[in-house]
Amino acid sequence: MSLTQAIKQQAQKLGFELVGVAPVGPVPELNFYKKWIEDGHAGEMTYLQRNAEKKLDIKLVVPEAKSVLVCGKIYHTDKPLSVACGDVTRGWISRYGWGDDYHDILTKKLFDLVDFLKSETGEQTLGRVYTDTGPIIDRVYAKYAGIGWYGKNTCIINQEKGSWFFLGEIITNLELEYDEPAPDRCGSCQRCIDACPTDALLEPYLLDARRCISYLTIELKGAIPESMRDGIGNHIYGCDICQDVCPWNKKAEQTTEAYFMPRQGLFNPDLTEVGSWTMEDFRLYLRRNPIKRTKFRGLMRNVAVAMGNSGKQLFLPVLRQMAKSDEPLITEHAVWAINKIEITNR
């Protein structure tokens, strides 16, 4: 068994369903990323612009780098998809936000894999670990590691397992056996583009984050533009629509890992219940959960918009209470929601 095969076998033992190796050399997609940023499609995500030169040349991060080991961890569960949950009195949280924070889970597994690398080759082996962090564009390396192709919805899609998986990388100075890039199998399909309620997919493979529900409900820290609020529907954290409608996810592999199972109250939650949370509730229910990224005011902003979009008068008491918040962001969106519900029911 070669070293590369041994590493892949160990990665699978650690729970990674997908694993591949990519070279460190420059590829066309890295130049596309630079233009995407320059065209303003990243919105307020200024952190994507930091260390941009390092993202275009991985050797500026690890000069001795020779290989990028890419690992995928499935988080899809047997719960219904968002497109099947049409009750407007309930909110939608993206599937990856139901359980424990994936950063913690994947990072530990990747460091365990680095330990294996060193045990096989010696302590001089380098293994720089990244999990959706740092100066590395994971989807590009996932493509060249054979994990999957870059879909029209900009997600990495695996022919056998779908697209419901997290990615993590190890940059190493080991010269491993590289995998072949995965061929694009989207064909003429554009269901993801047609299904996006905010028209965030400007064309195949081009996402304008400023129009994306995930960006608007997670990354955007201020007020959601009024012109975008209707399209958000009942989403209160992230969006799964472009993956829900993808044909390659019809038989997507599911996980049985306990840490990705929905915590109580996070699958298709009752909007009244979440809208009544206090700051203490937020901290208690979302400890070590990715939703905490929105902060309390961001989540309540999103809940107010979802309530307004429902048109349901039953939300008025909660919204009037939210409108009294000391946080202007919550107040503004609650007042907007109240007005929308009252206009809808005239």
Image (cartoon, rainbow, N blue to C red):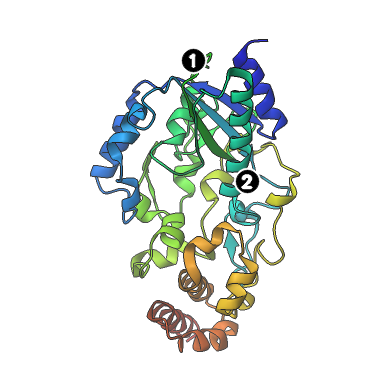
Q: Quadrant of the N terminus?
A: top right
Q: Which residue is at the far left? A: 38
Amino acid type for the residue under numbered disc 2: Ile
Residue at x 36%, y 68% (from the top left corner)? 222
Q: Amino acid at mark 1?
A: Glu
With respect to residue 160, does 75 lie above or below? Answer: below
SS at mark 1?
A: loop
Mark pair 1, 2: CA separation: 27 Å
Q: Position of residue 142 (x, y in %)?
A: 49, 29
Q: Which residue is labeled 1 in the image? A: 175
Horizontal and vertical percent for residue 4? Answer: 60, 16
Q: Would you call the spot at circle 2 few (<14 residues within 10 Å), some (14-19), or many (20 or more)? A: some
View extreme (top): residue: 1
Residue 42 tag number: none
Residue 257 lies, with reference to residue 152, above or below; the image says: below
For mark 2, give the secondary structure: helix
Nearer the observer, 108 or 297:
108
Q: Residue at x 61, y 78 (%)?
A: 272
Q: Nearer the viewer, residue 285 or 306?
A: 285
Residue 192 placement, left or right of 63: right
Left or right of residue 13: residue 298: left
Residue assigned mark 2: 105
